[in-house]
Image: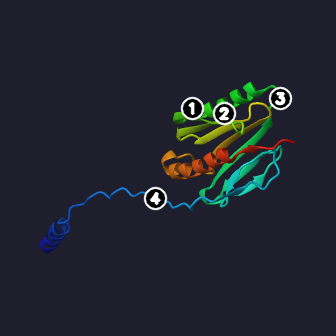
Amino acid sequence: MRNIGIIILFFLFASCDNETLPKPKGFLSLKYQKASYEPLKLKRPFSFEVPQNSIVKDEPKNWLKIQYPNLKASLDVTYRTIDGNLRELLVESERLVFKHAVKAEQISSNDYTDAKKRVFGTLYEITGNAASQIQFHITDSTKHFIKGALYFRTKPNYDSVLPAVAHIKKDVLKLMETLQWKEE
């Protein structure tokens, strides 16, 4: 019995010579393809450039969905004609953005203007665990109104999707910069 006690004590002292340290935090190393764009191939009252690595789905009413299969994300783009209702469209767009205020830590906006091409818009960035991290609207203020929202097919976790949001934000800015209205 005494020998067993000595053996147990021996193993206790022998196993305690290394100090236990917590594991260091690890970070994902996500790599994204260099952005390359092509003109929108669908017939719409507007045109802009879309990422080549995305899938553009045709939707009714001149709407479309730009899908990012590798990121499990989509940019939903809706189109409406203006018929004396620009104010209502702008209010509705802002209402949809601020609907995320419950989960958002911050909502910031950046205006975009290209008077020469008659493209006026706002890009909203929503930080926090909201359902959508990027929303935008663009108009010519007389005939056309476009609204877009980024969604991920996963439970919102802002820290996890932040690199993907930053990547897709570049595509949204490219969309806004290359947007042209088509006159019927």
Q: Of the numbered discs in the image, which one, if any, rests on residue 96?
A: 2
Q: Which residue is mark 1?
A: 101
In this rendering, is residue 84 above or below 70? above
Between the residue at mark 3 and the residue at mark 2, the CA separation in whole angstroms equals 20 Å
Disc 3 and disc 2 in contact, CB within 8 angstroms? no
Q: Where is residue 81? Give x, y as percent.
A: 81, 35
Left or right of residue 57, residue 20 in this image = left
Left or right of residue 143, residue 164 in this image = left
Disc 4 and disc 2 in contact, CB within 8 angstroms? no
Q: Which residue is mark 3?
A: 83
Between the residue at mark 4 and the residue at mark 1, the CA separation in whole angstroms equals 28 Å
- Secondary structure under tag 4 reads loop
- Secondary structure under tag 1 reads helix
Q: Where is residue 161? Give x, y as percent.
A: 53, 50
Quarter holding the C terminus? top right
Disc 3 and disc 4 in contact, CB within 8 angstroms? no
Q: Which residue is mark 4?
A: 28
In this rendering, is residue 27 above or below 165? below
Q: Residues within 10 Å of mark 1 (few under 14, many from 20)?
A: some
Q: Earlier in the sequence, mark 4 or mark 1?
A: 4
Disc 3 and disc 1 in contact, CB within 8 angstroms? no
